[in-house]
Amino acid sequence: MFDTHDTLHQELTTAGIYSGVYAALMASKPALSVRTHEDQATGLVFFEQRPCMRSNPITGTITFTLDSGAIVLNANGYTGPRWHTALERLTTTTTDAWSWQPAPAPAHKPGTLDGVLQLGANVTAETRIGSSHHHGDIADAGLALIPADRAACESAWALGVAVLGVLVTDDPAYRSPLLPAPSILTAPATDYPAAITTVAGALELLDENEDFDTARDHDPNWPTEAEGTAVRALRDLRDALIHTASAHQGEQPGEPNSTDRGGCCTCPHVMEV
């Protein structure tokens, strides 16, 4: 997606993403220090300046990938509930919109969760939540926001900054002072009955018109071919809405294991993208 780190860095700078990242980290609670990755030109490392508990410091990384254009956030030291609150910045709830599954036991210790959330058509969110080697409910977790193409990169990055801001400030309402609110969030559910009613009503008005009442398909009674094409498209849309509504009514969406959501168990791994 990006040929060089310089190209990626230029786009991040132009879009104001780095400024947004630094603004979030500077407002963090507890306070965090920041430095660049030693082995990467497009990433940052953050860590707690003065750990309240030296055995349990907050650490993390923010990485931008060349091949996929993704923003990857890894953090160790925040609680599981605080991580879930940050994920809720992407949607209204972490239980209904995310698709959760336990990670495969051979690769990860029990208690790790993998989650996937599709944000519109152009950005995919993937998260992994496990427990830290620290005590209590501390999580070692990661989030990747992966754009479908280069045009969606800025949206994915802005969403990443939004999640980062909530996580490090512990403010569920955090909004970046330097970036506009991300435009790609979970798409609202389509009100299929209302859409069907609207389209059917439009077709009824047309069919009551004496110029259209007997015209179907490629009937020469259409006043113009363009009008015929438009009405046929409306009929196709109505049929597609009815079909899609029926399909959605037949779905049985899966629910995450309620016993898995509250805390994290024993996995020290973070997500790799």
Image (spheres, rainbow, N blue to C red):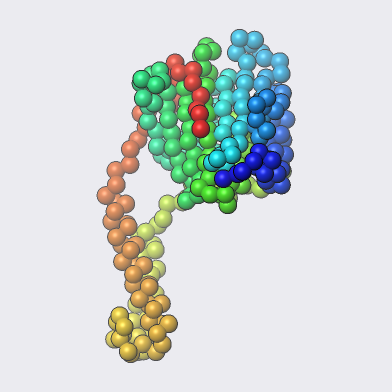
In the foreground, 15 or 87: 15
Q: Quadrant of residue 79?
A: top right
x%, y% of residue 110?
38, 19
Q: What residue do we see at 67% from left, 14% from top?
A: 51
Using the image, determine if residue 197 lies above or below residue 179.
below
Q: Quadrant of residue 68?
A: top right
Q: Quadrant of the N terminus?
A: top right
In the foreground, 23 or 270: 270
The reply to whether residue 170 is in sight is: no
Q: What residue do we see at 47% from left, 22% from top?
A: 130
x%, y% of residue 36?
70, 28
Q: Quadrant of residue 257?
A: top left
Q: What residue do we see at 47% from left, 51% from top?
A: 121
Q: What residue do we see at 49% from left, 21% from top?
A: 269
x%, y% of residue 65?
58, 37
In the foreground, 62 or 82: 62
